[in-house]
Amino acid sequence: DVKVTQSSRYLVKRTGEKVFLECVQDMDHENMFWYRQDPGLGLRLIYFSYDVKMKEKGDIPEGYSVSREKKERFSLILESASTNQTSMYLCASSLRVNYGYTFGSGTRLTVV
Amino acid sequence: DAKTTQPPSMDCAEGRAANLPCNHSTISGNEYVYWYRQIHSQGPQYIIHGLKNNETNEMASLIITEDRKSSTLILPHATLRDTAVYYCIVEDFGNEKLTFGTGTRLTIIP
């Protein structure tokens, strides 16, 4: 089975801190994605990547950046965390969209 | 504008078929219909997708109307473990990114 592993299940950070959320997949998928999920808003796409060193903005990229130096790893970076970035963050990967996405279990980030 | 419209919530009795509707009246010829579900505290899980023919797999069946303006996801014998939020997504063939809406919260009643 494809596994998508997110490094932390729960994270608490202070306002202004630089935060790294890590995601690793083990099935050689080209595509990787970062979403955030908030009550009443569903999942919203932050950034995605089609290949190593490639990234594209999703619907809500402001305040975030990403890094994909290796195919299996896709990192989400909050340069200066703010309280409105408190959310559940979900990473996903896919070979092709028609094969389905595989999601990680999520990281619940609280910024205080 | 959202590409799909789903009811916010539904109930279904355990053991019965759960029929989840999705309206996508502006769907274009190259757009697929995808279904995912999200069980509480987990990431979404892929269920099924289709273009215009009905599809079936071990999890569910997808019925797409002939004009493709709506579809129904069918869970043939719902169990308590099917309680989840179900997302219907319409996306262009070749577009690798999916836009999730708020879905339908399905509750299976014992």
Image (cartoon, coloured by chain):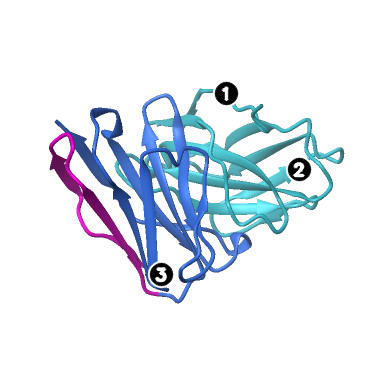
Chain colours: A blue, B cyan
Give the residue type that dot 1 points to. Pro
Give the residue type that dot 3 points to. Val
Q: Which residue is mark 1?
A: B7
Between the residue at mark 1 and the residue at mark 2, the CA separation in whole angstroms equals: 17 Å
Residue A2 - label: 3
Magenta-drawn segment: A1-26
Give A98 or B54, whichever is nearer the viewer.
A98
Give B80 or B37, whichever is nearer the viewer.
B37
Q: Quadrant of the C terminus of chain B?
A: top left
The percent coordinates of residue B73 (x first, y second) are 62, 41
Of circles 1 and 3, which is in front?
Answer: 3
Give B97 or B80, whichever is nearer the viewer.
B97
Pointer 1 chain:
B
Pointer 3 chain:
A
Q: Secondary structure at mark 3?
A: loop
Q: Which residue is mark 2?
A: B64
Of circles 2 and 3, which is in front?
Answer: 3
The percent coordinates of residue B60 (x first, y second) are 58, 50
